[in-house]
Amino acid sequence: MAELATIARPYAEALFKASASDLATAAGWVDELGAIAQNAQLLQFADNPKVTVDQVFDLIASVAKSTLPDQARNFLRTVIENGRLSALPEIATQFRALKNAQSGSSDALVYSAFAIDAQALPEVAVMLEKRFGRKLNVSVVLQPELIGGIRVVVGDEVLDTSVKARLEQMKVALTA
């Protein structure tokens, strides 16, 4: 939705400039707020004309896993007062893109059939950084239907070494 991206851009850029001294911390809380703001019931509650800005703010602040720093509280209050709560997930996405562009890295989603242990994850990350040719921020998502192996998504690039993908390739080869 282009309109949402257009609305989110100035917020993401302003937050990026304001938190230049500690981008990692800001990325953490803006991602958390973006995830909270995706809740349909929360958005419906916030759109209710009988609900005040303070009520919406207090609800979101209470749902947050950790205590929000002052910068996060001010940012959240500004977003709510301007009626842009629905744009918060897109703001988080654009903020992450700005942060990655500055650091020269990309986000990588690793879908795995099984949990990857703490010792193996750095090795996987190094291998993927060599494969994709850039620094990666790796996060793992369990997807048991892959049967085995991993599927990696970095931007619009996909590396699929899963058993499910191999079975699909064999199926296509046998039916052709």
Image: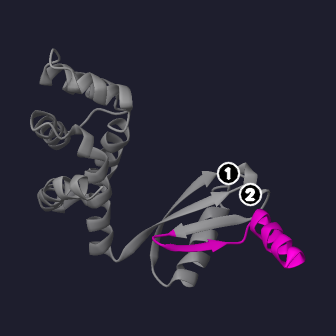
**Residue 122 in the image, given as x and y percentages of width and height:** 59, 67
Q: Which residues are magenta?
A: 154-176
Q: Residue 112 at what x, y percent from top left?
A: 68, 57
Crowding at dot 2, Cα within 10 Å, few <14 / some 14-19 / many 20+, comes out as many
Residue 12: image quadrant is: bottom left
Q: Quadrant of residue 61?
A: top left
Q: How many marks?
A: 2
Judged left or right of residue 44, residue 165 is right
Q: CA distance from mark 2 to mark 1?
A: 6 Å
Residue type pointed to by label 1 = Gln
Q: In what quadrant of the picture does the C terminus appear?
A: bottom right
Q: Residue at x 41, y 71 (%)?
A: 106
* In the image, residue 88 above or below residue 175: above
The residue most toward the top is 50
Give the labeled residue for mark 1: 143
Mark carried by residue 146:
2
